[in-house]
Amino acid sequence: MANTLYDNLFGKHAGNTAPFLHLPDGGTISYDGFLGTAARIANAITALGLEPGDRVAAQVAKSPQALALYAACVQAGLIFLPLNTAYTVDELSYFIENSGAKLIVCDGARTDAIAPMAEGLSAQVATLNADGSGSLMEQAADQPETFDTVARGKDDLAAFLYTSGTTGRSKGAMLTHENLLSNTEVLVDHWRFTGDDVLLHALPIFHTHGLFVATNIILSVGGKMIFLPKFDAEEVIAWLPKATSMMGVPTFYTRLLEDAQFNGDLVRHMRLFISGSAPLLAETHVQFEERTGHRILERYGMTETNMNTSNPYDGERRAGTVGFALPGVELKITDPDTGKTLPDGEIGQIEVRGPNVFKGYWQMPEKTAAELREDGFFITGDLGKIDEDGYIHIVGRNKDLIISGGYNIYPKEIELLLDEQPGVLESAVVGVPHPDFGETVLGVIVPEKDEQPDLDAIMEAAKQSLARFKHPRRLVVMDALPRNTMGKVQKNVLREDFKEMFATA
Ligand code: MCA
Ligand code: AMP
């Protein structure tokens, strides 16, 4: 029976004994072996009573089994909801409640903390540890290696990825089989991926970049991945000679350049380096070319849309730009006040439309309507312009967002926590330049009259409820926040005043 995503990414490899994953210990996993594991997991999850359309939340370390869980969900018609392993139980409980997930797959070390929350939300819990052990694989062990693929059409939902807005909590972006498959096919073609490619994969698999861009492309062409648990410059340098291509966030490239062992000889044979998720400094692009002779190909995407634009494969890869709209994607620059299209060269908000654009935010019709126009254009919240040669430049954001090492951080969430702390009258959180993470989090606190807030206690409170990557790297106390005549906090002034704070961090 037809299943749009499963058939095109996974099912077509049935019986293929060629390697799919190369593991850091030197082992390999074949396509066929991987599909067998996925089918066993699909059987195990179905045996738990889950039905097509149910959500499966996964907060698990990167492993072949974690990837097989994704394949299993697609095969069983379940909606896959991957979550950052850094999220605290507080953060997790929101995603489970909001999505109505029926099953949470988590690391065994976290079950004590997660089980009570899961029980309260009527979700089952299964464990999957970094080494592939845990109750999920125990339950899968006795299951058959084949599974009757559940029929799913192009408009059926394949995944929810949570992403925040400027106000309130995260929203579940609903992605269909077609959203994911159409983008994969365009990228394969645009970036010339083939079955001969060996992709060095050091990204996490709980976000679009590592899962729906990197992994789906390799699955689509039947190539191989060097599947590293995380980015570690030494490990990456050791494996690069065996790879043909790599995808990364800008921090990957700046960290490689900082390593004296990273030189042109190591990567002379490589076909392609791709960067995205955050702006790649033109300076990094230039330094990388000087060191290696390779021009990094920068592209631009979002959770809600997968990839929208890319620099050309053959033409000039222009530093500081994100290239052109991908085939099938329409992109326009509009006036944020009127929504009218602006002439080339003028700065406005970036809007995109195409088969890659998501179906809306789960159970949030008003938020969907605010960002996804009736005519199908999605308002990205990024500010950009189109230059005289047609290259798209991202010049800023119309949304209050910090991108640290490729992870998105929404200041509002941190401000709400800071504002609640004893002695704090109000706060503002801004992103300031950071040499390693691109941007990092600075918290500015205004004390209540005659109060001296305990900054250590505030950091401790942040640790309790927020993932580590969201913690302010520094807290600064000010008498008052800069405001404009309308009373709005001028975050641009704070960003300017503190832009050198981490210059030498
Ligand atoms: C880890 N830490 C971080 C980050 N990552 N803090 C801020 N920002 C981060 N990104 C914490 C660690 O918990 C640690 O805490 C401390 O900072 C330093 O850790 P370090 O060892 O330096 O970090 P790492 O483990 O090496 O990770 C850095 C990383 C990683 C390799 C850059 O964050 C990463 O893989 N980022 C990729 C994110 C990604 O895939 N984004 C794509 C989103 P402590 O101080 O306790 O030790 S998809 C997307 O954006 C769209 C769709 C797109 O266009 O792709
Ligand atoms: P996310 O919400 O994780 O999907 O992050 C999407 C955001 O990352 C976009 O709206 C952009 O602000 C940013 N982004 C992704 N790729 C790039 C890039 N190449 N240059 C600048 N910003 C980027």
Image (cartoon, helix red, strand yellow):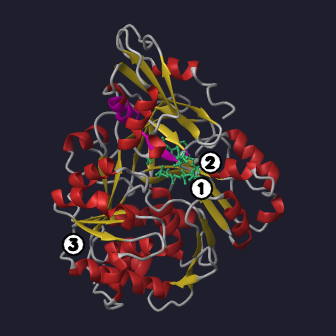
Instruction: Report the number of numbered marks.
Output: 3
Q: Which mark is residue 52?
A: 3
**Residue placed most toward the observer, 84 or 438:** 84
Q: Nearer the viewer, residue 187 or 478?
A: 478
Residue 334: in sight, yes or no? Answer: no
Which is more foreground, mark 2 or mark 3?
A: 2
Expressed as whole percent of the image width and height from the top left, the position of residue 404 reads: 53, 42
Tell me which residue sits at (37%, 28%) in the image.
418
Q: Is residue 416 left or right of residue 477?
A: left
Q: Residues within 10 Å of mark 1 (few under 14, many from 20)?
A: many
Q: Secondary structure at mark 1?
A: strand
Three-letter amino acid code at disc 2?
Answer: Thr
Q: Amino acid at mark 3?
A: Pro
Residue where numbered disc 1 is placed: 248
Q: Residues within 10 Å of mark 3 (few under 14, many from 20)?
A: some
Q: Which residue is mark 2?
A: 251
Image quarter (top left, top right, bottom left or bottom right) of the N terminus = bottom left
Cβ at disc 2 under 8 Å from ligand 1 = yes
Label 1 sits on what residue type?
Answer: Gly
Q: Position of residue 183 (x, y in %)?
A: 45, 61
Contact? badges 1 and 2 (CB < 8 Å): yes
Q: Earlier in the sequence, mark 1 or mark 3?
A: 3
Observer-nearest residue: 387 or 99?
99
Q: Which residues are magenta?
A: 405-417
For the point 44% across and 34% down, which residue is it? 459
Q: Nearer the viewer, residue 42 or 384?
A: 42
Give the x, y percent position of residue 82.
37, 60
